[in-house]
Amino acid sequence: GRGSAGTLAGATETIRATGAAERAAAGLSIVMPVYNEADGLAALHTRLVDVARALKTRWGLACEVVYVDDGSRDRSLAIASTLPADGIDVQVIALSRNFGKEAALLAGLEHARRGAVLFMDSDGQHPPTMVERLAGHWIDDGFDVIFTAKAHRKSESFLRRSFGRAFYTLINWGSRHKIPEDAGDFRLLSPRAAAALRQLPERNRFFKGLASWIGFRQLRIDYEPAAREHGTSSWNFGALLGLSIEGLTAFSVAPLRIASLLGLLLAATALLFGVKILVEVLVFGSDVPGYPSLVVGLMVIGGAQLVMIGVMGEYIAKILSETKRRPVYFIAEHSVKRADETAPAA
Ligand code: UDP
Ligand code: MG
């Protein structure tokens, strides 16, 4: 009766509590890619220190922050190097040049010294106040991948939104595994999810896709991104297009399938057209006006072939860059400050 149900609930509670304690013991690494963020970095670090303190109090969770300087041309690296390890371990990794955000995230993931990993932008758009909530879904609820999605994209232009929608339609087209739309890089990975991501051998990584592809228990959280406090976004339309092609070719063969379908469609049309001409000549004995239809046909087929070759070229380029097996980044400088060490006077 009631008594046993009560005991059962109690037992579940105990199991959950034990699991939570074990999870919290793994600690959390906050990975922050930094590219020309000198203006806001110190203030953001102060907020992170507060967050780390709250996590320590609530779960006994030990935190580190990993700043990955992605070849900034401003004082970002100098500033990151002076940030105090105030209740939080601080790692500063300086890449040898600008390798791009995905490479910086990988450098952080590979050097994270705690179990769980949180990806977070260093421009203040990913609110530090949300970290505790994300950590709660991992520690208390046992989720492995807690990813965030922008609640709405009103601030973005119509063109960029349509582009985004087309991208997700294409990347998810015909694939068994759907990548959630609008998911950002603000994401917490449990230790086993982080380990899974480290195991992937590919050089060109598209973390948004991969983090969802690995599976485990995923949770989506909608949030309102803050406005960028300093500087400007480094994604112009060209860079976004590049990332999209990167993501598409890494994740989906939809463009190749579309090319094949297009080829089939054109071939079928040509066949029907041929039959029509045959019937006209043989049955009605009419003169077929050849020249215009010839030119149109040539242009359509020529264009379609060029597009398909281009699409194939993208995949071949991907194969080439993967077979070279080059390292994704080089580290120029690396420093680790323990929270218990006294911070050097800045
Ligand atoms: N970033 C980076 N390398 C780059 C470009 C950007 O590490 O080549 C970092 C940047 O410092 C920020 C995050 O990636 O922390 C997101 O960049 P941004 O704000 O420009 O992108 P958006 O928020 O517009 O997507
Ligand atoms: Mg940003």
Image (spheres, rainbow, N blue to C red):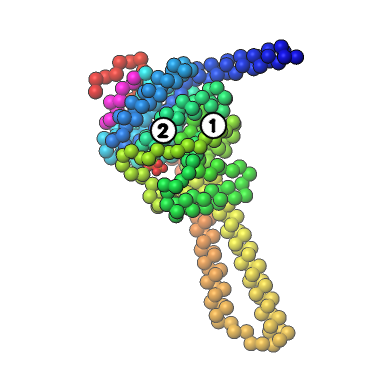
Residue at 29 percent across and 18 percent down: it is 343
Q: Is residue 256 inside the magenta stretch?
A: no
Horizontal and vertical percent position of residue 163: 48, 53
Q: Which residue is mark 1?
A: 145
Q: Magenta stretch?
A: 78-86
Q: Quadrant of residue 232?
A: top left
Whether residue 165 is visible: yes
Q: Is residue 83 left or right of residue 126?
A: left
Q: Nearer the viewer, residue 266 or 176?
A: 176
> Three-letter amino acid code at disc 1?
Val
Horizontal and vertical percent position of residue 254: 58, 52
User: In which quadrant is the C terminus drawn?
Assistant: top left
Q: Which residue is mark 2?
A: 127
Q: N-terminal of the two: label 2 or label 1? A: 2
**Farthest-out residue, left:** 346
Q: Is residue 52 above or below residue 273?
A: above
